[in-house]
Image (tube, helix red, strand yellow):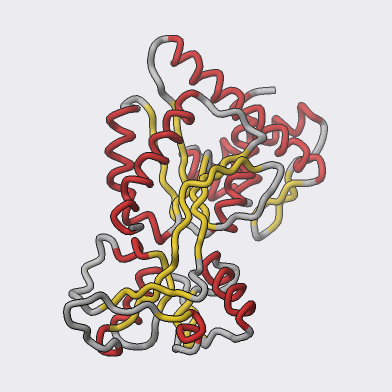
């Protein structure tokens, strides 16, 4: 079995399209189709069901896809370990970041990665938890930062930080205080405000719903918006309030138009967790990258967690 043919098949099966796979692999589509057909002839089975909308794996294809990902991963591990034997940490590391953190840590993480792993390639992907969990299982991500992930036997989790969520409001709706910090807001009172929240199953949304249900009240949701910048822009313009980690406002110039207040009774606390697939062994490069990621994250959020 040719490794190139296997790689081509895995990419087509994952992307569901010969056209998209040819672009991703930077090969001509006829050559891609020919190599996969040669693989099917060798294995004497149809691996892909071709239709007008793309291509989907057959039952035999699903089986080969599962094995193929593991084979290609082991080949990548072997290449990296050979690089280590030459004294160089190389290879590719793909990391998933949540939108609430990506703006804060992308630059320092890239700087630390280039300084410590100059011969390795870093890929950063911004996304929500469910999408990143699927990417971890498929092998498209090596590790990801997630909020409140569910426990799973195929995922290795490392708790990095427990962070209180805060109420972010337009300044025009918050009374001015002189010489003292603004008082905290009871979660029951915050729930009664017009809130701009991500749609379910966003981790912060689920956490808020669980906490308010324990109080016997419901969230007053003015708008559902799946975009961090869009949420903060709407809050700034007075359309409602948001509930997010305090470091969400890092590197965002809001001109003092947003006010942050703590929540209490109870204080909703979110867990920031570093997650990787337990089914795939980590390369030395990935281990170093994981340590770098933890250090960068903890340093970056430290000013906002006092």
Q: Is residue 168 above or below residue 288?
A: below
Camera-side residue: 42 or 296?
296
Relative image position of residue 81 (x, y in whole percent) = 50, 17
Camera-side residue: 162 or 300?
162
Camera-side residue: 290 or 186?
186
Q: Is residue 11 above or below residue 87?
A: below
Residue shown at 48% from the left, 70% from the top: 267
Q: Quadrant of residue 246?
A: bottom left
Q: Quadrant of the C terminus?
A: bottom left
Relative image position of residue 250 (x, y in whole percent) = 28, 61
Q: Is residue 241 left or right of residue 170?
A: right
Residue shown at 70% from the left, 38% from the top: 65
Give the tally of numbered discs: 0
Relative image position of residue 130 (x, y in whole percent) = 59, 58
Residue shown at 50% from the left, 73% from the top: 198
Q: Quadrant of residue 261?
A: bottom left
Q: Is residue 74 above or below residue 194?
A: above
């Amino acid at each position: 079995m040719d490794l190139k043919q296997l790689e081509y098949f895995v990419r087509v099966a994952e992307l569901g399209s010969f056209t998209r796979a040819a672009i991703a692999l930077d090969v001509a589509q006829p050559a891609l189709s020919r190599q996969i057909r040669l693989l099917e002839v060798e294995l004497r089975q149809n691996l892909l069901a071709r239709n007008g909308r793309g291509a989907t794996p057959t039952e035999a294809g699903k089986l080969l896809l599962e094995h193929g990902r593991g084979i290609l991963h082991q080949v990548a591990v072997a290449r990296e370990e050979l690089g280590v034997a030459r004294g160089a940490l190389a290879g590719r590391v793909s990391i998933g970041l949540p939108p609430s953190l990506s703006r804060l840590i992308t630059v320092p993480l890239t700087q630390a990665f280039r300084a410590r792993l100059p011969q390795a390639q870093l890929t950063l992907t911004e996304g929500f938890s469910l999408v990143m969990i699927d990417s971890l299982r498929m092998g498209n991500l090596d590790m990801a930062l997630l909020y409140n992930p569910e426990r799973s036997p195929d995922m290795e989790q490392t708790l990095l930080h427990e962070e209180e969520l805060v109420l972010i409001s337009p300044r025009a709706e918050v009374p001015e205080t002189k010489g003292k910090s603004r008082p905290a807001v009871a979660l029951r009172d915050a729930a009664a405000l017009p809130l701009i929240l991500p749609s379910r199953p966003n981790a912060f949304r689920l956490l808020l719903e669980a906490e308010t249900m324990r109080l016997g009240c419901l969230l007053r949701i003015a708008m559902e918006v799946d975009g961090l910048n869009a949420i903060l822009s709407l809050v700034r313009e007075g359309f409602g309030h948001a509930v997010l980690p305090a470091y969400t406002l890092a590197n965002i110039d809001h001109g003092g138009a947003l006010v942050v207040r703590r929540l209490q009774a109870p204080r909703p606390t979110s867990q920031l967790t570093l997650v990787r697939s337990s089914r795939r062994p980590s390369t030395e490069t990935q281990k170093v990258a994981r340590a770098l990621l933890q250090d960068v994250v903890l340093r970056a959020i430290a000013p906002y967690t006092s």
